[in-house]
Image (tube, rainbow, N blue to C red):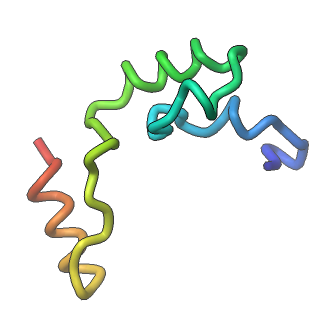
Amino acid sequence: MYRYGLPVDPLTVLDLSAVTDRENVIPDEYRLKYLNDHILRPINVIDLKFAEGRTVNERSQNFLSAYAQ
């Protein structure tokens, strides 16, 4: 992964809260980042049903009706 044209560790940039098997997937040095990402995320992504619908508009409406506040 590159940021501003320079290589960076993707685990420092990506949201780690979506990882479901954190004990076996996330290295120890990223556990604090996982917890921080998990606290900052306003929705639980574990049970998120992504992109349901036949069209882009239908998928957008389904997502917004389920998760918008």
Which quadrant of the structure image shows residue 33?
Answer: top right
**Viewer-nearest residue: 18 or 9:** 18
Residue at (26%, 47%) from the top-left corner? 47
Residue at (61%, 39%) from the top-left corner? 14
Which quadrant of the structure image shows residue 31?
Answer: top right
66 on left or right of 30: left
**Viewer-nearest residue: 65 or 49:** 49
The residue positioned farthest toward the right in the image shown: 6
Residue at (70%, 24%) from the top-left corner? 27
Q: Position of residue 23 (x, y in %)?
A: 56, 24
The residue positioned farthest toward the front in the image shown: 24
57 on left or right of 45: left
Q: Position of residue 62 (x, y in %)?
A: 15, 67
| Residue 29 sits above or below residue 8 on the image | above
| Residue 19 sits above or below residue 59 on the image | above
Q: Position of residue 12 (x, y in %)?
A: 69, 29
The total of numbered circles placed on residues is: 0
Q: Position of residue 10 (x, y in %)?
A: 73, 40
| Residue 33 sits above or below residue 15 on the image | above
58 on left or right of 41: left
Which quadrant of the structure image shows residue 13?
Answer: top right
| Residue 63 sits above or below residue 52 on the image | above
Q: Split into 4 quadrants, where in the image is the C terminus? A: top left
28 on left or right of 9: left
The residue positioned farthest toward the bottom in the image shown: 54
**Viewer-nearest residue: 53 or 28:** 28
Residue at (15%, 48%) from the top-left corner? 68
**Viewer-nearest residue: 24 or 41:** 24
